[in-house]
Image (cartoon, grey):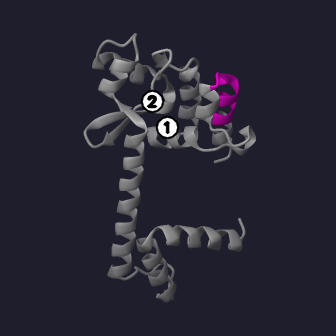
Amino acid sequence: MSVTTVMDRLRARAEDDPAFLDTLEHLASFELADPFDVPPDATRRLARDLNQRRHEQRAAELRARSLTTSEVVELVGSITDRKAVDRRRHRGALLGIRGIGRQTLHPRWQFDARRGNTHRGLDRVLQALRETAPDPMDADAIATAPQPAAGGASIADLLADGDVESAVALARLAGDQS
């Protein structure tokens, strides 16, 4: 990645987030003679605040595009209670992300609302994602990221289109690139 590209990304991010701009300005004005020296309290506080906002934003975005366990029970005809959702998660047939409040969230891309079930081949895609990213939050991020090798489609898009083989291959490819 070129310096120009990095600067363009930093500029765009700073335009969207004034706190990020404050942090960049503070870091740019701070002279650090020893790279292993502890930064001043103000810098650490700004970095902590920025990171906290980033986590909160990520959690809010996940909540907006996910189903709760109760909503999964309502949607999936073959699931009759919360324990059945837990069993699917433990078998690796459903991706659930814990730790967002007190709920486990299930990203919506896994479900085919027309069929009232998960997409066909979901278990194979989830297995490939687990090999690449054992953390469910990371697996979700990989599944929903646009993939240049798929013309900008995500793994989740391919799964929804029924192209399970390509979705699995891209999930495995993501692990090879780390």
Amino acid carrying label 1: it is Pro
Outermost residue, front side: 114
- Of residues 176 and 80, the one drawn nearer to the viewer in this rendering: 80
Q: Reply above or below: 77 against 10.
A: above
Q: Secondary structure at mark 1?
A: loop
Magenta-drawn stretch contains 170: yes
Callout 2: SS: loop
First in residue order: circle 2 vs circle 1: 2
> In front here: 28 or 18?
18
Count the numbered circles shown.
2
Number of the label disc, if any, that sits on residue 107: none
* In the depicted structure, whether residue 56 falls above or below residue 106: below
The single residue placed furthest to the left in the displayed view is: 102
Task: Determine crowd level at label 1: few under 14, some 14-19, many 20+ residues with C-alpha closer than 10 A.
Answer: few
Q: Residue 124 or 103: which is nearer the viewer?
A: 103
Q: Which residue shows up at 42% across the image and 47% down it?
A: 61
Dominant secondary structure (helix, strand or loop) of the stretch shown in magenta = helix
Residue 95 tag number? 2
The percent position of residue 37, horizontal first and vertical second, equals 44, 81
Q: Write down the region rendered in magenta.
A: 161-171
- Who's the residue at 29% across and 15% down the image? 81
Q: Position of residue 48 (x, y in %)?
A: 35, 67
What residue is drawn where x is 25% and y is 39%?
Answer: 102
Residue 14 on the magenta segment: no
C-alpha distance separating marks 2 and 1: 11 Å
Q: Which residue is painted at 43% across and 39% down in the image?
A: 65
Q: Which mark is residue 134?
A: 1
149 left or right of 10?
right
